[in-house]
Amino acid sequence: MVRCANEVAVMLKPVIAGFIALHFQDALVFAAVFSGAAFVWDLYAVKTDGIALMDGYDIGWWWIKWAIGVGVAAGVRWWMRRLWGRLRLLGALDAAARQLVVSFLVFLTLTWYQVTVEDPAESLVEPFAAGALLSWLLAWLVLFVLETIDYYVDERPPSEFSPTSLNVVAAVVIAAIILLDLLAFLGNWILALLMIGALALFAGGGWVFKAVGGAPLSKQRMFY
């Protein structure tokens, strides 16, 4: 049976929303617009227990978790040396609008985050956190496409996909948050191990192919 897990079980989805809000946006006004829209989406379009929409206690926790995600994004921006130099109240509207579109594209991959499967046939774990796993795969697919687009439309001559690009860093952070959710709140440690194996295969596979092809280590990158 397919159902939606309760809000406590999917504790870290709002954390990802908060991270997305500040990670991709340099215009604080547009980051606020995205955050409000993401909250409204979860409030009216996403059910927390298969029957009821989010209300009361869940609403307060959503914003607390969102704030944690914003803190994660601030730390990542500081690490990438773009915490204060890039942030603006509004900035260029065309750039802010593009960043808003990117934010929504990534966020919408989380729509089915709380879907779980009870009594799954031949499953290694119950309830099976199919939504979290699907959200990770969809998020990585969207980020891979965005990274590919950035690679080819970059005004500077591109050489390789950068491991410190916005999309690659976002992919790593989102995967880490989902892994933590699988381990700490969804009780799907077997899925977490399978996800770690898939991540290692995805990253290491590219390195192996490049090494076999004779590419130097300095040219071997994740996500390419």
Image (cartoon, rainbow, N blue to C red):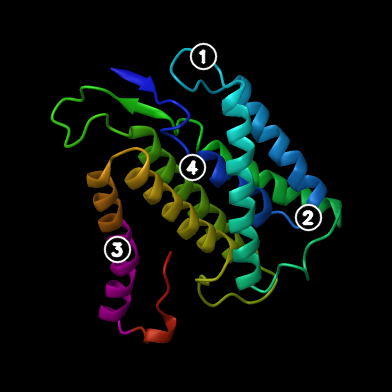
At label 1, the amino acid type is Ala
The region drawn magenta spans 199-214
Mark pair 2, 4: CA separation: 29 Å
In the drawing, does residue 13 fall left or right of residue 33?
Answer: left
Residue, disc 3: 200
At which x and y percent is residue 121?
A: 16, 25
Mark pair 1, 3: CA separation: 38 Å
Residue, disc 4: 12
Q: Indicate whether 165 appears above or below 128.
A: below
Disc nearest the viewer among 4 and 3:
4
At label 4, the amino acid type is Leu
At label 2, the amino acid type is Ala
Q: Secondary structure at mark 2?
A: helix
Taking the spot 16% from the left edge, 37% from the top edge, the residue there is 124
Residue, disc 1: 52
Residue, disc 2: 95
Instruction: Give the mark nearer the N terminus: 3 vs 2.
Output: 2
Mark pair 4, 3: CA separation: 23 Å
Q: Secondary structure at mark 4?
A: loop
Taking the spot 36% from the left edge, 41% from the top edge, the residue there is 133
Taking the spot 70% from the left edge, 69% from the top edge, the residue there is 82
- Residue furthest to the left: 122
Q: Is residue 19 visible?
A: no
Q: Residues within 10 Å of mark 1 (few under 14, many from 20)?
A: few
Mark pair 3, 2: CA separation: 34 Å
Q: Secondary structure at mark 1?
A: loop
